[in-house]
Image (cartoon, helix red, strand yellow):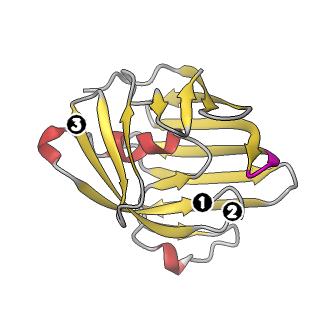
Amino acid sequence: MFRPLPSSLTVRWRPAEGDGLEHMTITSSGAGFRAGSVLIGERGGQPYGMHYRIDCNAQWEVTSFRVENNHGQRLALRSPKPGHWLDEAGQLVEHLTGCVDIDLSGTPFTNTLPIRRLSLNMDSGPVAFKMLYVPFETLQPVPDHQIYTCLTNGKLYRYAAADRTFTADLPVDDFGLVTDYPTLFKRH
């Protein structure tokens, strides 16, 4: 359904409102890929600068990630097997058990992870996920329940918060990367 990632791919998104930019490069090999990104912008009147790195295996399962802000606050976790997260000291982060995919609040890239990992299509119906959600304001990871539904195979997916407080229809490109996230991000 989606094209395989090239050995290197760079994409940019901008916020739908206000100033900012995300510059992300994905490098891939047969074993998986790494996405590295730098983001600048403003939220709630406060400027921010962030960078993240996400490593995934060939099945689009996150094996590790690191997020850091320009003040030096960071979060780094690794997943030796899907749904189990270890902190930098190698300790299990129990409240995140069962979260396979991650959702970083300041980027549309992480919406691609569950779509690609499960090859979601119209026959899949709505699929509920327990996500590892990281708000950029605090970098404190929490479980978050989300629902994805394929509306048009390989082209359009609906994201919904499980509590139905937010829904967005997300068009994607041939690689499954979000091109427009209504009210939040647009491909640059």
Position of residue 57 relative to residue 102, above or below, is: above
In the rendered view, would you say 34 is above or below 187?
A: below
Q: Which residues are magenta?
A: 44-48
Query: What amino acid type should be assigned to the residue bearing mark 3?
Result: Leu
Left or right of residue 157: residue 131 = right
Quarter holding the N terminus is: top left
Residue toward you, 13 or 93:
13
- Determine the residue positioned at 24% across, 40% down: 150
Secondary structure, magenta segment, majority class? strand
**Residue 134: which numbered mark, if any?**
1
> Is label 2 in contact with label 3 (beta carbons under 8 Å)?
no
Earlier residue among tags 1 and 2: 1
Q: Which mark is residue 185?
A: none
User: In the image, 104: left or right of 155?
Assistant: right
Amino acid type, label 2:
Leu
Q: Secondary structure at mark 1?
A: strand
Residue nearest the viewer, comparing 179 with 165 = 165
Q: From the viewer's perspective, is residue 116 above or below residue 137?
A: above
**Residue at left 51%, top 80%?**
94
> What number of labels is visible?
3
Evaluate if marks 1 and 2 touch, with contact meaning CB atoms under 8 Å apart: yes
